[in-house]
């Protein structure tokens, strides 16, 4: 492991040296003038800052609904953002296209030239092709804070452009971008790239521009995972962010369709993040838990999609999370329209308002059970990772991944052992079928086995297998029961 890969804060002179190298190598130009960028971003953040918006929500027990959306053409992106704002989104997104995320800036510019307000050739907004001045006009034209959404191992220029343009929120980090989204990337390479971004955020914060960063961790893409394991990645991302001076972090919980476990997960991820930030000396960092709609396949039928959104909102509202990342009723059929995005935001806000009034009465002993199990498992893994790094989360993560002490299921990344298998119990909560080399306490493993026993009995063979894991991919699908010919649907 290279000696320089650690959680030590990047020296400011080294950051300046890296900035010059990155801009010259990838764009052939000088870096943005930070003094000028801070002046613009500071005045913009005073009017529409994401940190202030989330702080108010957390203090008052409210939830900010945030959609995902982005198109190529400037006019269409502005119309999209205004539509989402009018629907009640507390923060509006700029989702960056995949060509820009892949550093194919010239290709993105060519695709932008072929896009129109009615036809987006790209799957998002080509941030660098539009540039700082044009994106400042876009952000200044809406009355909400703006979060830039992207995910890749190297987003340094995307982050530079986003912050200089006035975005006060950013998404992703090394754990998720590397281990869930990359095949060949390593933490040794990606963590320094992300430390550059987080150090830049820290400098913006020091100059009066607080920027919120999402800690997504090991939120499984397209499948399910045990919540405690997902939270381990969230906490490690948060510790790496805080190590570079990030002061506002959004711990992320992906909802999976089991209400009690989802509620407990929202509570646990906030508890764990605050606990380990304080333990490593970052007690001044503010956190705002985000619940996120199911990350797997969405129903194609709109009524079913509304039902899945409702299950997610229910858990979010009971847990009183300050943030809810909202997918749409068209998620299962393609790129959602602005109208579908707006309808989903309105639906989410209404149901959140309705349920949150009853939140305390809806907490149950099952939520408490899931919470205690979640905390027990996550703490055991996190403590082992930190021990392997002698208290350093970066060094610990790299060493633990190499030995399987840190492991996740279904990863596309070649550096992940992938010996962990999740499966749902008879009620739909996600458990460890195989925990690999994760250092879980014996008490937790006993509880996991007990909770899987009823499904084992129901399977007929008495044992759960990889086929059960595959079958669980369609857990949230719903098919109408088949009636016998001539049967009465109301009988």
Image (tube, rainbow, N blue to C red):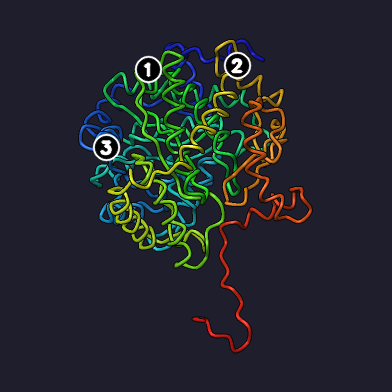
Which residue does the image show at 47% across and 62% down from the upper left?
305
Answer with mark 3 or mark 1, whichever residue precedes in sequence: 3
Answer with mark 3 or mark 2, whichever residue precedes in sequence: 3
Where residue 45 sits, quadrant-wise, is top left
Which residue does the image show at 60% across and 56% down from the upper left?
475
- In depth, the one of 372 and 388 nearer the eye is 372
In the image, is 111 to the left or to the right of 420? Answer: left
Of the two numbered discs 3 and 1 in the rendering, the one whose residue sits closer to the viewer: 1
**Mark 1 to mark 2 CA distance (whole Å):** 21 Å
SS under mark 3 = helix
SS under mark 1 = loop
Of the two numbered discs 1 and 2 in the rendering, the one whose residue sits closer to the viewer: 1
SS under mark 2 = helix
Residue 47 position in % (x across, y down): 20, 36
In the image, is 485 to the left or to the right of 93? Answer: right
The label shown at residue 410 is none
Q: Give the class, few, some or many, for how many residues have Cα within 10 Å of label 3's Cα (few <14, many ≥20).
A: some
Judging by the rendered image, the residue that carries numbered circle 2 is 395
In the image, is 405 to the left or to the right of 295? Answer: right
The label shown at residue 53 is 3
Q: Give the class, few, some or many, for how many residues have Cα within 10 Å of label 2's Cα (few <14, many ≥20).
A: many
Residue 36 position in % (x across, y down): 28, 25
Check the image and report above or below for 89 versus 54.
below
Judging by the rendered image, the residue that carries numbered circle 1 is 283
Residue 481 position in % (x across, y down): 59, 73
Answer with mark 1 or mark 2, whichever residue precedes in sequence: 1
Where residue 479 sits, quadrant-wise, is bottom right
**Mark 3 to mark 1 CA distance (whole Å):** 21 Å
């Amino acid at each position: 492991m290279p000696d320089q890969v650690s959680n030590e804060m990047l020296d400011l002179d080294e950051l300046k040296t890296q900035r010059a190298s990155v801009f010259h190598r990838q764009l052939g130009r000088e870096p943005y003038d930070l003094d000028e960028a801070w002046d613009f971003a500071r005045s913009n953040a005073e009017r529409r800052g994401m940190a202030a918006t989330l702080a108010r929500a957390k203090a008052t027990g409210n939830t900010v609904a945030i959609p995902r959306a982005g198109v190529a053409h400037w006019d269409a992106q502005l119309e999209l953002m205004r539509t989402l704002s009018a629907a009640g989104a507390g923060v509006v997104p700029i989702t960056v296209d995949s060509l820009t995320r892949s550093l194919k800036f010239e290709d993105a510019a060519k695709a932008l030239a072929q896009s129109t307000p009615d036809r987006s050739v790209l799957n998002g907004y080509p941030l660098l092709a539009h540039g700082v001045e044009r994106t400042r006009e876009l952000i200044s034209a809406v009355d909400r804070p703006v979060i830039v959404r992207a995910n890749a191992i190297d987003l340094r220029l995307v982050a530079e452009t986003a912050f200089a343009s006035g975005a006060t929120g950013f998404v992703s980090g090394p754990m998720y971008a590397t281990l869930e989204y990359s095949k060949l990337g390593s933490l040794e390479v990606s963590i320094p790239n992300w430390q550059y971004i987080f150090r830049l955020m820290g400098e913006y914060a020091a100059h009066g521009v607080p920027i919120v960063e999402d800690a997504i961790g090991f939120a499984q893409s397209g499948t399910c995972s045990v919540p405690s394991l997902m939270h381990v990645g969230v906490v490690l991302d948060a510790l790496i962010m805080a190590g570079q001076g990030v002061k506002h972090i959004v711990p992320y919980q992906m909802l999976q369709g089991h209400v009690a476990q989802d509620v407990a997960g929202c509570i646990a991820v906030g508890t764990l993040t605050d606990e380990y930030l304080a333990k490593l000396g970052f007690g001044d960092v503010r956190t705002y838990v985000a619940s996120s709609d199911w990350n797997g396949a969405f129903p194609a039928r709109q009524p079913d999609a509304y039902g899945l959104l409702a299950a997610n909102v229910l858990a979010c509202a009971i847990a009183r999370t300050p943030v809810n990342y909202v997918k749409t009723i068209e998620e299962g059929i393609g790129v959602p329209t602005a109208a579908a995005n707006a309808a989903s935001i309105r639906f989410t806000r209404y149901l959140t308002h309705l349920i949150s009034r009853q939140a305390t009465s809806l907490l149950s002993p099952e939520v408490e059970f899931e919470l205690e199990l979640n905390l027990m498992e996550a703490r055991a893994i996190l403590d082992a990772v930190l021990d392997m790094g002698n208290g350093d989360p970066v060094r610990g993560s790299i060493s633990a991944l190499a030995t399987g002490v840190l492991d996740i299921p279904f990863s596309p990344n070649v550096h992940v052992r992938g010996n962990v298998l999740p499966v749902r119990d008879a009620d739909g909560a996600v458990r460890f079928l195989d925990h690999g080399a994760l250092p879980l306490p014996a008490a937790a493993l006993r509880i996991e086995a007990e909770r899987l026993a009823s499904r084992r009995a129901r399977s007929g063979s008495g044992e759960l297998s990889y086929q059960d894991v595959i079958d669980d991919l369609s857990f949230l699908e719903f098919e109408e029961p088949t009636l016998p010919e001539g049967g009465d649907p109301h009988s």
